[in-house]
Amino acid sequence: MSSLLDVRGLSAAYGKVEALHGVDIEVPRGKIVTVIGPNGAGKTTLLAVLMGLLAGRGTVIYDGGDMSGCTTEMRVARGLCLVPERRELFGGLRVEDNLLLGAFPRIGKATQTIRSDLDGVYQRFPRLLERRTQLAGTLSGGERQMLALGRALMAKPQLLMLDEPSLGLAPRIVRDTFHVIADLKRSGVSILLVEQNARAALQVADYGYVLETGEVVLEGTACALAANPRVAQTYLGLSGRFERNTA
Amino acid sequence: MTIDIALWLTQDAITNGAVYALLALALVLVYTVTRVIFVPQGEFISFAALSLATLQAGKVPGTVYLLMAGGALVALIDGVAAIRAAQPRRLIGIVILNIGLPAAVAGAASLAALRPDNLWLQMLVTLAIVTPFGPIIYRLAFQPLAGMSVLVLLIIAVAVHYLLTGLGLVFFGGEGLRSPPLSDFSLHVGVLNITAQSLWVIFSSIVLIFTLWLLFEHTLYGKALRATAINRVGARLVGISAAFAGSLSFTLAALIGAIAGILISPITTIYYDTGFIISLKGFVGAIIGGMVSYPVAAAGALLVGFLESFSSFWWSAFKESIVFTLIIPVLLWRSLTARHVDEEEE
Ligand SMILES: Nc1ncnc2c1ncn2[C@@H]1O[C@H](COP(=O)(O)OP(=O)(O)OP(=O)(O)O)[C@@H](O)[C@H]1O
Ligand SMILES: [Mg+2]
C-alpha cells in the first residue's frame, strides 16, 4: 500500500523569499514521522503548505489523490488536520464550543458520534472537562495546548499534523502530550510531528527528517537519526539549551 | 418642553432606534465575519419597503427580475466552476438554488400581487424576494476578493451601493411609496398616541434581536460565524470555509434589512435612496460599538434614535447633521481609548 502522504519537490515562498526548496517527505499509514530542525528552517511553512494555507509548488499526494487546488476546508474534510504553532483557538468562545467546532464538517450529519467523540476528548483531557464553560482565551498555556489537540481530535483526522506541541510547556505536560501522540498512533492515526524537542520527537517517531534552511539535509529511521553523530551534536547534545529556548 | 412632548419624542426615538439597532447589528455581523463595511445594507430596506408597496399596488416589483438575473449569474459562475472541477453532480443543487428558487419566488410574487388584501402574504413574499440578494451579492462581489484589504472591500461595497441604488431608481422611480400599517389601532395615553405600528416595530426588533442572540449563543452555525470573526485561520483549520461564513452573514444581513424595511414602510415614506440614510444611522451605532460589539452597537443605535428625535424638537433643521457629527467625538474617543487590535490576534 502506498504512503498516506507523499510530498515531492515542494517549494514555497513568502513574496520573493523562498522558504522551502524542493522538499520530499513521506508519511506511511499508521506511522509517526517527525521533522526536526532549527528555528527558521521552514517547518511551519511546510505544514502551512500541506494545509493549503500557503501556496506552494510541487506535488502533494494524499490518500492516493492529488491535493493541488484543494482549499484548506476541502483538506480538512478529507481527514487532514493541523494543530498550528500558534494554536489559533477561538478565544472568545467557551472551551466546549471550541471542541464542538472541531467537528464542524460533521455537523448535521453525525450528531450522535460528535457527542461521544466529545466525551472521548474529555476522558483524555479531564482538565478540559473542568474548564468546559470557561472562555478559551483565559486558559493557561498547557490547557490551550490540550484544547488545540482536543479540537483537532474532534475532526477525526486520518493524518494529524502537530507543530511544536511541546512549545512552552512544563516537562510533565510535555510527557503527557507525547503519551497522547503515541496513543493516537495505536488508534490508527498517522502523524506528522514537527518539534524542537528532538529527543522526545525521535523517541516517539518511526521515521524522521532533518530540515535546515528549507531543505531536507538528512533522513532515516528515528533510531538511526538519534544515533547519527551530527544529529546527536546539533539537536540532542545541546538539547538543554534548546529546551530553555523553547520554554 | 412638557412631559407629554418628551414622552412623544421618546416613543419616536425608541421606534426609530430599534430599527437603527437592527441595522447596526447587521453591519457588525458582516464586518466581523468578512471585514466588509457593508455600505449597501440600506438598499435592502429600500428594496423591501418599495417591493412591498409595489405588490400592494397589484404589480410585480422589478426586484423579482433582478433576483432571477442575479441567480442566473451565480448559477453560471458556480456551474462553470463545478464542471471545471469535474463535479457535474453539483450542477443539480446549483440550478435548484439559483434558478429554481428565484423562479418560485417570482411565482409567489405574481400571486401576491393579485391579493392586495393579504398583507401577510405580501410581507412574506417581500422577505423571500429581498433576502436572497444577500448571498448573491456576496457571491458575485465579495467572495472572489475575500483576501483583499479592508479598503478594497470598502470600495467594492460603495460600488455595489451605487449599482443597487441606481437599479432601485429604475425599478421604483423617483417618487416615494408607503405601505399601509398592519393595523390602524392606536392607544391614547394622555396626549400620547401610541400607534400599533410603532409597538409592532419595537416588538419585532426585540424578537429579532433575541433570535440572533439564540443563533449566536446556542447553535453551532452561529458559533461558526463567531469563530470566523474571532480567528480566521483557526476557522479554516476546523473546516469553516470563508465562503460559507460570508454567505451566511450576508444572508442574515439581508434578512435583517428586509425586515427593517417592512417594519418602517408604514411609518415613513420610502424613496429608492432612503435606505442608505437609515443604514448610515445604524452605522453610527455600529461605530460606537467599534464595529465589533453587538450590545454596544445596539445601545449606540438607540442613542442615535434619541439624539435624532430630541434634536428634531430643538433644532429640527440640523437633526441629520447632529446625528452624523456624533461620529467625530465617538471616533476620537474610540481611537484614544481602544488599544490597537491586530486583525488576527487571539
Ligand atoms: N509570514 C512570513 N513572511 C515572510 N517570511 C516568513 C513568514 N513566515 C515565515 N517566514 C520566513 O520563512 C522561514 C521559515 O519559517 P518557518 O516559520 O517555517 O520556520 P520554522 O522551522 O517553523 O521555525 P521555528 O522553529 O522557529 O518555528 C524563516 O526564515 C522565516 O523568517
Ligand atoms: Mg515553526
Image: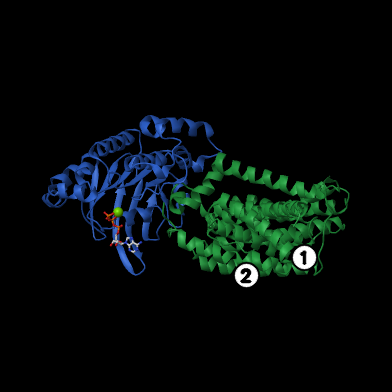
Chain colours: A blue, B green
Q: So how many labels did they put on this image?
A: 2
Q: Is residue B238 visible?
A: yes
**Relative image position of residue B4 (x, y in whole percent):** 78, 52
Count neighbours of disc 2 (C-alpha within 10 A) and say few if under 14, some if 14 to 19, many if 20 or more. Answer: some
Residue at the spot 67% in from the left edge and 70% down from the top edge: B162
Q: Nearer the viewer, residue B222 or A134?
A: A134
Q: Which mark is residue B159?
A: 2
Question: Looking at numbered disc 2 in the image, what kind of residue is underneath it?
Answer: Ala
Whichever of labels 2 and 1 marks the residue nearer the N terminus, that label is: 2
Q: Say which residue label 1 marks.
A: B271
Q: Chain of mark 2?
A: B
Read off the chain for label 1.
B
Q: Cα distance, mark 2 to mark 1?
A: 20 Å
Q: Secondary structure at mark 2?
A: helix
What's under tag 1, amino acid-wise?
Tyr
In the image, residue B291 above or below residue A170: below
- Front residue of B262/A177: it is B262
Question: Does B238 appear above or below B290?
Answer: above
Q: Quadrant of the N terminus of chain B?
A: bottom right
The quadrant holding residue A40 is: bottom left
Residue B140 in picture, x, y percent from top left = 61, 62
Image x and y of residue A123, in percent = 38, 29
